[in-house]
Image: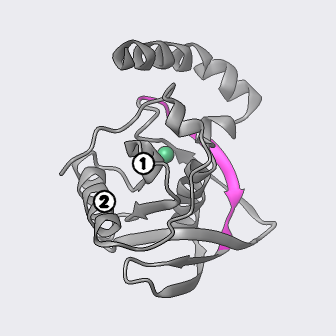
Amino acid sequence: MIYDVKKYGSEVLRQKAEEVKEITPEICEILDNMVETMYSTKGVGLAAPQVGISLRMFVCDKGDGVVHKVINPQITFLTDDLKEYEEGCLSVPGIYKKVKRPSLIMVEYQNELGENITTELDDLLAIIMQHEYDHLDGVLFTDKISPMAKRLVSKKLKALKKETLKNDE
Ligand code: CO
């Protein structure tokens, strides 16, 4: 099943998501649907709040066909070394801007089998996981762009929000 992706202006995108208490068949089904939704929209990552489900989980695939289903993640290490990537977001269509983030991180999470995973990530996967992790705390990449970039996209964001609020009525 392909979900509707919530767009900029939706309240759920600004909420702090809740821990997944138990990895039930329903949770696994939601994750499968999220993967299907991510591929159908050609995204590299999708967090549960983006489909209106305020739980701490996300899926991602940096483009090599390896799907990561990430439940209750914790970032336990961030390097001081920052790297800049141009980011976009399925919830913020049409806007692509550079964001500086740590280039290497350590993440702990549970997979869909309930196994505890500890992994060190760099490059694109580190960036994607930080972007998706932010969604679980109600943070969007546009919060992290430079003040100048913010000024440049402020009109577009306002228009997006207006559109979203109109569709939600
Ligand atoms: Co996003």
Q: Is mark 2 within 8 Å of ligand 1?
A: no
Indicate the position of residue 103 as horizontal and vertical percent values. 67, 66
Q: Looking at the image, is 3 positioned above or below residue 117?
A: above
Question: Does the magenta stretch mainly form a helix, a strand or a loop?
Answer: strand
Q: Which residues are magenta?
A: 94-105
- In this rendering, the answer to whether 39 lies above or below 95 is below
| Residue 149 circle label | none
Q: Which mark is residue 30?
A: 2
Is residue 85 visible from the viewing direction of this image?
A: no
* Residue 69 in magenta stretch: no
Q: Which mark is residue 53?
A: 1
Residue placed most toward the observer, 160 or 114: 114
Tell me the SS state at disc 2.
Answer: helix
- Asked if disc 2 and disc 1 are in contact, CB closer than 8 Å, the reply is yes
Q: Nearer the viewer, residue 45 or 83?
A: 45
Name the quadrant of the C terminus.
top left
Quadrant in the rendering for residue 65 = bottom left
Q: CA distance from mark 2 to mark 1?
A: 9 Å
Q: Report whether residue 97 is seen.
A: yes
Q: Amino acid at mark 2?
A: Ile
